[in-house]
Amino acid sequence: MSAEDSVGSPSFVSDHGLWSDEQFAVAERIEAGLREVDLVRLVFPDPHGLARSKTLTADAFRSVLRNGMNFSPGPFVFDTGHAIAVDFLGEPGIGVEEISGAGNFILVPDPLTFQVLPGPGPRTAWVIGDEYLRDGTAHPLSSRAVLRRLEAEYAGRGHAPVIGLEVEWYLTRLLDGEPGNAGNGFGLQGPAPRAAAVNAGYQFNLDARYDSVAPVTDPLALHLLELGLPLRSVEHESGPGQVECTFSPMSALDTADAMLLFRTATKRWCARSGHHASFMSLPLLDSFDPSGWHLHQSVRDTATGRNLFAAEGPAGGLSPQTKAYADGLLAWSRELFLLSVPTVNGYRRLGPRHALAPTRLDWNEEDRSAMLRMVGGGSGAHIENRSAEPCANPYLALAGQLFAGLEGLDGAAEAGGVPRAEGAAPALVPQSLAESLDAFRAGRAERLLGGPLKACLVKLKESELRRFEGWCAATGADPGQVTDWEQREYFEVY
């Protein structure tokens, strides 16, 4: 195979009008500076939100930048344990003919995401790509394309979403260098890395607890800033070695791109020092507490810069648009919950045994057991959705929020969110992947995702759930407790 065979199609970007003037201008600057780069890691988010990549030489990337690169659809057909969930050799059943026979799609770098990674070794750049069919249309299974469409819908109304990240994760110490390949295969994940806690935990925000993680997290913080990520704070949470990172507000697409880079870079950085970073919600390690991902969101009027969630006048408070947006989030919460909590393990956090977990489909100004928390006033007024798990696909999780919120702003959401009888307690958030999958399958998610991506996600999650339930039945494991299956499935890859 020649080098040209890996190139998507000559002049693919220009022929199909895929870039803005800004992207073309940035691409020219990238081309001029490629002599200062050795390797380029071309990345895209798969349906699970994991970064899939190929590493190119700088010369090869010079051709790929404007022409795209052929890429296998494998990341679209494997579930979280690398089991084939979409039959690409037969009838895929998701409405994308190009998946049949594992035909390639074209991955086009987005110049606006190009950056050189700091650190020793070969001078390596990172760039996120967008997936296209060979006719130049956005790939129907592209999660980044879904979020782009939502941003465009907001822009068409003169609005811009503003998103803040608050992410919890675990820092652990690796005990050995075993690769975890024993018994591994398609849908058969080998043993998880053996790891130990870095401290005893359970002294919330104690400075001495932070001291025990600081030799890793302090240089990590500087590394994240060098990457251009708007890191605001790093703190020690409750669990042993549980860390929380917060970031300044960004646009929706920038936020999802930042989350993809943050998780990838954090895992890579910690591994260099013999540690392991995991965004799995509740690892199977003694006394660990679940990790969550809180999405802070508001909407700005692009003409005036005004926060739509801020009430006008000296009294301050929250505007009617805030309630409308929240009604949208609640009205669509069950149907789209799978996008925020997509794994078996993510539901370990959402039961009443965890006092600070968001267990109710409701909103409140300060009650952290409600899914939605109204925060602040004036220009800083926003909604915090506390339901997501840290390993969710950031593009789909954000798109689900923005879609539901826009339904509320447009008046299309059912008034009051999830309906309930007068005086009745709010409904609980879904308590299992099976419950969320049922609601997603029966719901209207195709309005957001399109039919093919909804069908693909159903097949991926059905496969994951079927393997989990089969393992529990075969081993006699208690599905009500974190299992070794979950540790093997999620701890290393997420």
Image (cartoon, rainbow, N blue to C red):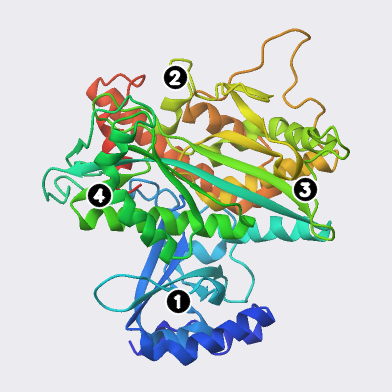
Which residue lies at the image location 56% right of the left edge and 73% below the top edge? Answer: 112
Residue 9: tell me if it is visible.
Answer: no
Specify whether 105 is left or right of 440.
left
Q: CA distance from mark 3 to mark 1?
A: 42 Å
N-terminal of the pair, mark 3 or mark 2, is: 3
> Residue at label 3?
307
Give the labeled residue for mark 2: 354
Q: What type is the residue that disc 4 sits on?
A: Pro
Q: Earlier in the sequence, mark 3 or mark 1?
A: 1
Cα distance between the residues tagged 3 and 2: 33 Å
Which residue type does callout 3 highlight? Asn
Circle 1 crowding by C-alpha within 10 Å: few under 14, some 14–19, many from 20: many
SS under mark 2: loop
State the image coordinates of residue 344 (x, y, percent, origin top left).
41, 32
* 1 or 2: tag closer to the N-terminus: 1
**Gap between marks 1 and 2, in whole Å?**
46 Å
Mark 4 = which residue? 215
Q: Residue at x 57, y 71 (%)?
A: 133
Q: Position of residue 357 (x, y in %)?
A: 50, 24
- Decide if residue 98 is on the left or right side of residue 216: right
**As shown in the figure, which amino acid type bears the numbered disc 1?**
Asn
Can you tell which of label 3 and label 2 is closer to the viewer?
3
Q: Which amino acid type corresponds to the residue marked 2 in the rendered image?
A: His
Mark closer to the chain start, 2 or 4: 4
